[in-house]
Amino acid sequence: MPWLLPWFLCAFGLVLLLLAGDALVKGAVNLSLRLGVPALIVSLTIVAFGTSAPELLISIQAIKDNAPGLALGNVVGSNTANILLVLGVPALLATMHTAECNTRKTYNFMILASVLFIGLAFRGVFDWISGLVLLTGLAFMLGDAFRDAHQHRQACKGAPEEEPEGADPDMPWWRIIVFLVLGLIGLPLGADLLVDNATIIAKTYGVSDTVIGLTLVAVGTSLPELATTVMAALRRQADVALGNVIGSNMFNLLAIIGIASFVGPIAVDPEFLSFDLWVMLGASILLAPFVYLCWNITRFWGVILTGLYLTYLAIVLT
């Protein structure tokens, strides 16, 4: 049936994006380590940027296709989904012992990044000026993370250095090249397929590209974080789960829109200013008791968080 084709191509584009992003991270990490770049720098830069590559490519492609609502919706929707869905669903399976985590500093950065982002949104457009401000914030965040990581490594001198995600000391050169090529070809192709067909679906059902970005695309690009967090919760690694969500949200706000703003101006739909941005900020503030009061994210909170996300989806879609 013809109406199924855009849905199939949209799903195929998403899968291609996720696989290509993973391939690019593996290739770039192992190439950097082979060239003598310290694992610490690789973890803070290449891995972080590589895992956000699908969202970045989607935003850039959406701007080129004159669908800025999809670009902004993807970031705002992903941040909301990361907190309510990505932390809510794993908590339904097993209590997340976040009381053992110390994420106050990075959480404070995330709230500051959210407030900065909302403030810039009230200018009505994310242009190169907004992009410069966001990327300055990103540089400050990375610099602080690098200092903390360096101090931690100095304090633990003599201990074996932890390898970054995707590292394989025995990976041959030909495999590194294959991963890089697959990533560099698959990412733009997947982004093109996803954005084009998401736009077709939006027009077919009479909804805006903003709504598609906030729902279909946002949930799709949050799937890697969801998978990581589910496994972390089952392994009782709550610090990995919470850190993954907070770090992903900061990168979405500062890096993705910051870089995409230089490709073209991103107009801000008034609906974002009156509703979606405040939902994103409210979801972020919901984490405060788990960060500051050391509450565990129990199944009760899993039900609350997941229920809030489903309610949000229902409001957006209607």
Image: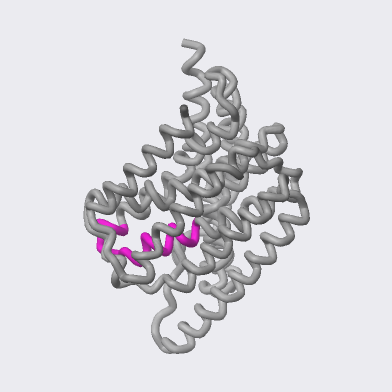
Q: With 133 as the anchor, is 47 left or right in this view?
A: left
Q: Which residues are magenta?
A: 232-248
* Residue 105 within the magenta-colored segment of the rendering: no
The residue positioned farthest toward the top in the image shown: 1
268 and 85: which is toward the camera: 268
Residue 99 vertical placement versus 54 (above, below): below
Q: Position of residue 29 (x, y in %)?
A: 53, 62
Query: Is residue 90 in view from this perspective?
Result: yes
Q: With 267 as the anchor, is 76 left or right in this view?
A: left
Q: Position of residue 191 (x, y in %)?
A: 59, 37
For the stretch drawn in magenta, the main secondary structure is helix
Q: Position of residue 202 (x, y in %)?
A: 56, 24
* Residue 244 within the magenta-colored segment of the rendering: yes
Q: With 214 as the anchor, is 283 left or right in this view?
A: left
Seen at 75% across and 46% down, the residue is 263
Residue 220 vertical placement versus 205 (above, below): below
Seen at 67% across and 33% down, the residue is 67
Query: Is residue 22 in view from this perspective?
Result: no
